[in-house]
Amino acid sequence: MPQINKVLVANRGEIALRIIRSCKEKNVETVAVYSRPDATAPHVVAADESVFIGEAASSESYLSMEKIISAAKDTGADAIHPGYGFLSENALFAKKCKDAGLIFIGPKPDAIDLMGDKTKARELMAKANVPYPPGTESAMKDIDKARQIAEEIGYPVLVKAAAGGGGKGMRIVHDPADFDKSVKAAKSEAKNAFGDDRVYIEKYLEEPRHIEFQIIADEKGNTVHLFERECSIQRRHQKVIEEAPSAVLTEELREEMGLAAVNAAKACSYVGAGTVEFLVDKHLNFYFLEMNTRLQVEHPVTELITGLDLVALQIDIADGKDLPFSQSDIKVNGHAIECRIYAEDPSDNFLPSTGLLRRHRIPAGPGVRVDAGVEEGQEVTINYDPMISKLCTHAVDRSAAISRMLRALEEYEISGVRTTIPFCEFTLQHESFINGNYDTHFVQDHYTPVVGSLYKNDKQDVISVVSSLLKNRSNKAEPNQTPQVADPSADNWWKNRIK
């Protein structure tokens, strides 16, 4: 019978810190690993032990299976939690952990491999009677036949990487004349990103909503869903704002999609926490998109509406324990929203913004949760994902959760880098979002960035600099004169000028 007393967290940033917190509450010891830039990062400070594993490049640190497994063995860890990203969906890493006598806190290698291959997953969904978009069930082998299928299902179509994710190796084709070059471009990008150039095609759904179901299963096959998350506010096919539950699902559709998610998990003998992602069209038809065989970035909104600790459940299941509840025990309590606070410039196509985090003052108050992986004075570099934090609010209903989020965004103070805070404020005040009438095209349909605008972050920088200058000037007294105190009205004048 497995027994987990010490967990090595094979990750960094907010997710590493979040896992460490759940471990501490379970009286499980923790080991952090870190690259050179992360030597003093919050997750390293919070862990009971820490091990240096390499330089800034992920290939030399957080993606090095050998170094991570060696660190676990050297520190006497029983298990490894991979978090999300990096090695979290790497079947070989899960197998290497098992071979080294370590518990991998995640699904079995076979499930990771099966659901990580989009074409294998589509074939499995067909057998499990889970609906998926029309298109090729397996990887494209004959471009002439694929072109014929595209004509049959009708344009626009999507060319997608079989081993893909995050929008890489994906092309939308509106015109049949662009089909061949789109396939070539998608194959090339897929090869560079995943070392695998296989692609397939499926019908491109217009006005699609991205709705996913959290599932969790134990070793005995007991499988439940923890309701849905709406993840349609995206830029470059990557999520920025999520909410739970979705504003568009009826109770009947929620039940139908939840059952499909559970069937998808059972079809691959899934164990642990995972997410089954669907696309929902404007007619409320839903289609299987993919399964993420790991903990999701946006898992906090599910925790907030269910009152469950998903990381604690992951650890218990990996330790051989049964699920402590059935489907009928799980209820939705209120509404939750998550805004991902990225170090990106929304006025410049969401390009990463690097620099010293000179100010980081997080919001607080009832129903506010902040999962941050960085602290004030820390450098935001180009080496890793530009996420600063995940800001979540929870309230009795959707309207109250939106109001609470707007209040929290207003309180949030960050300077030194541009962030997605202005975009989040724009979105939550937009009529389409307020009405729940939005889809994955929200950014391209509604968001027009004001290039060169003065952001709240910039205002804080100006106030800080001007206040400092005024105080310094007032204290530079002439010889034999009494230093003068800065006039507080001068600070107020500057603040009023830049509102």
Image: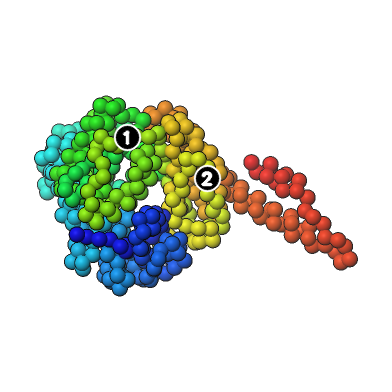
Question: Is residue 367 visible in the rendered structure shown here?
Answer: yes
Protein image colouring:
rainbow
| Residue 449: x %, y % from top left | 49, 41
Which residue matches tag 1?
331
485 w.r.t. 137: above or below? below
Residue at 40% over, 44% down: 240
| Residue 414: x %, y % from top left | 54, 51
336 w.r.t. 79: above or below? above
Task: Examine the image and state in which quarter residue 202 appears.
Answer: top left
Residue at 45% over, 35% down: 395
Q: The residue tagged with tag 2: helix, strand or loop?
A: loop
Q: Nearer the viewer, residue 241 or 69?
A: 69
| Residue 293: x %, y % from top left | 24, 50
Mark number, residue 364: 2
Q: Amino acid at mark 1?
A: Lys
| Residue 435: x %, y % from top left | 42, 27
Query: How busy is the neighbourhood of tag 1: few (under 14 within 10 Å), some, or many (20 plus)?
Result: few
